Image (cartoon, grey):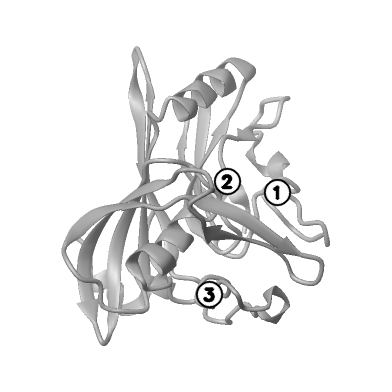
Amino acid sequence: MNLEDRILFVDGEAIVIDKPEGLPVDAPRAGGASVESRIDELKLGFKRPPVPMHRLDRDTSGCLLLARNPRARAHFQQAFERGEVTKTYLAVVDGLVEGDEGLIELPIAKVSSARGGWRMVADEQGKSAATHWRKIGEAEGQTLVEFRPLSGRTHQIRVHAARGLGAAIVGDPVYSLPDDAELGTMVLPESGMLLHAWRLVVPRPPKEPIDVTAPVPDRFGRWLDFLP
């Protein structure tokens, strides 16, 4: 699968691709394919390769913005820093969530061990993080939730689902475990993680904003019937 076939939007400033689940944005330390290693597939006749403007976890699919020139890169970076970029995610969480919508405000900090590496935890001394959530549907003890992060912390939605809503994202190999679990015991489930970067809106006046929606992948199964 060529990344060019995953393009959702393209013009002289930007490309938005539907990043597939299982492909990291940055090159892994252990090697292997990544958006970075395959970036030439997105040059589309430009000499300079595009640059990813944000990150999606390896096992998160959906909208990924890339800048095609330095001027666009600076503009998009400023838009992210000012909180003007709107990112909307879909996730299935393993539990029934009380209420219809709300705001999770839960600071996040990074912890690590020599054996297992790192992960993020809820920590009052950590960096502030806020996520708006809205329930879309529920079935058989699970809930389909729309998440809209208001800050851009690493693994923010995954931590806020597990520790803020009390229901980890289905297929999450890290945050479905207690915070004190040994990091080295984490195993990636074969089914994949049900987290998808559904919609991305990027202002760029005086032009119309980039407003892109990525198709929800088939791994969401029955939950596709809950969507418009």
- Do the residues bearing badges 1 and 2 touch, measured as CB atoms within 8 Å? yes
Q: For the residue carrying disc 1, how many other residues have a C-alpha within 10 Å: few (<14), some (14-19), or many (20+)?
A: some
Q: Position of residue 123 (x, y in %)?
A: 51, 56
- Comparing 151 with 86, the one in front is 151
Q: Quick one: which residue is furthest to the bottom in this view? A: 140
First along the sequence among labels 1 and 2: 1
Q: Depth check: 226 or 38 in front? A: 226
- Label 1's element? loop
Say if residue 217 shows up in the picture.
Answer: no
Percent from the top left, x then y, of residue 52?
A: 61, 37
Where disc 3 sits, the SS reads loop
Q: Quadrant of residue 114?
A: bottom right
In contact (CB < 8 Å): disc 1 and disc 3: no
The three-letter amino acid code for the residue at tag 2 is Arg
Q: CA distance from mark 2 to mark 3?
A: 18 Å
Label 3 Cα neighbours within 10 Å, binned few <14 / some 14-19 / many ≥20: some
Residue on which disc 3 sits: 192
Q: Nearer the viewer, residue 60 or 47?
A: 60
Q: Residue at x 48, y 42 (%)?
A: 152
Decide: marks 2, 3 in contact (CB < 8 A)?
Answer: no
Residue of label 2? 55
Residue ID for mark 1? 26
Kindly identify the amino acid type of the residue bearing the numbered disc 1: Asp
Farthest residue toward the front? 125
**Figure disc tally:** 3
Image quadrant occupied by the N terminus: bottom right
Q: What's the CA distance linking mark 1 and mark 2?
A: 8 Å
Q: Earlier in the sequence, mark 2 or mark 3?
A: 2
Residue 126 got which mark?
A: none
Label 2 neighbour load within 10 Å: few <14, some 14-19, many 20+: some
State whether residue 82 appears in this view.
yes
Q: Is residue 151 above or below residue 60?
A: above
